[in-house]
Amino acid sequence: AAVLLNVPLMMGLAPVMGIGGLALAISITATAEVLGLAWSLRRRIRSIQGASIADTAWRSAVAAGAGALLMLGGLVVVERVVPALLEHGIGRLLVLAAVGGAGLAIFILVAAALRAEELGRLSGLLRRRR
């Protein structure tokens, strides 16, 4: 069923957006597939806590969106202020590390501000490993 959605999306988005369109089509299809499978599973297993999953999903989506916006903004600034940095592999790697690290930091800060339970669980797991 996913292929029936994926192929038309790819054919429609790739000419307009290039390889980014292919990635977007795959992301949309994967999201639709996960939602469909979750709905199907919930019908079979009544004990799945849909409200808890939805709560986690919105918190994660908001935190991921904040991180993505920061990374996009950082990349735009680099492209306009120091475009030469993106012309070489080591420069791209440095930009990726800096922008990606900042995005991760914002994700964690926003998730913490939204009181995402998973951060506490992750912290506990990391402490146990020591």
Image (cartoon, rainbow, N blue to C red):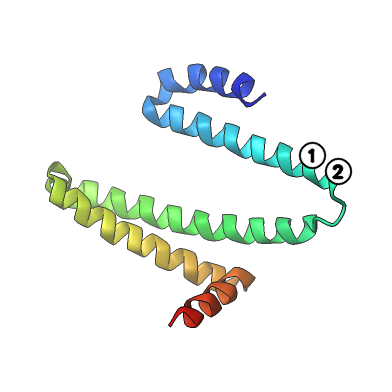
Residue nearest the observer in this picture, 42 or 73: 42
- Give SS at disc 1: helix
| Residue 116 visible in the shown view | no
Residue at 70 percent of width and 41 percent of height: 35
**Label 1 is placed on what type of residue?**
Ser
- Give SS at disc 2: helix
**Label 2 is placed on what type of residue?**
Arg
| Residue 119 visible in the shown view | yes
Q: Give the Cα distance between marks 2 and 1.
A: 5 Å
Q: Which mark is residue 43?
A: 2
Label 2 crowd bin: few (<14), some (14–19), many (20+), radius 10 Å: few
Q: Quadrant of the C terminus?
A: bottom left
Label 1 crowd bin: few (<14), some (14–19), many (20+), radius 10 Å: few
| Relative to 95, residue 32 above or below | above
Query: Where residue 66 sits: x, y (%)?
Result: 49, 58
Query: Where residue 68 sits: x, y (%)?
Result: 44, 53
Query: Where residue 104 sits: x, y (%)?
Result: 41, 63
Q: Is residue 79 left or right of residue 33?
A: left
Residue nearest the observer in this picture, 89 or 81: 89
Q: Is residue 15 left or right of residue 52?
A: left
Query: Where residue 14 sits: x, y (%)?
Result: 43, 21
Q: Which mark is residue 40?
A: 1
Residue at 51 percent of width and 56 percent of height: 64
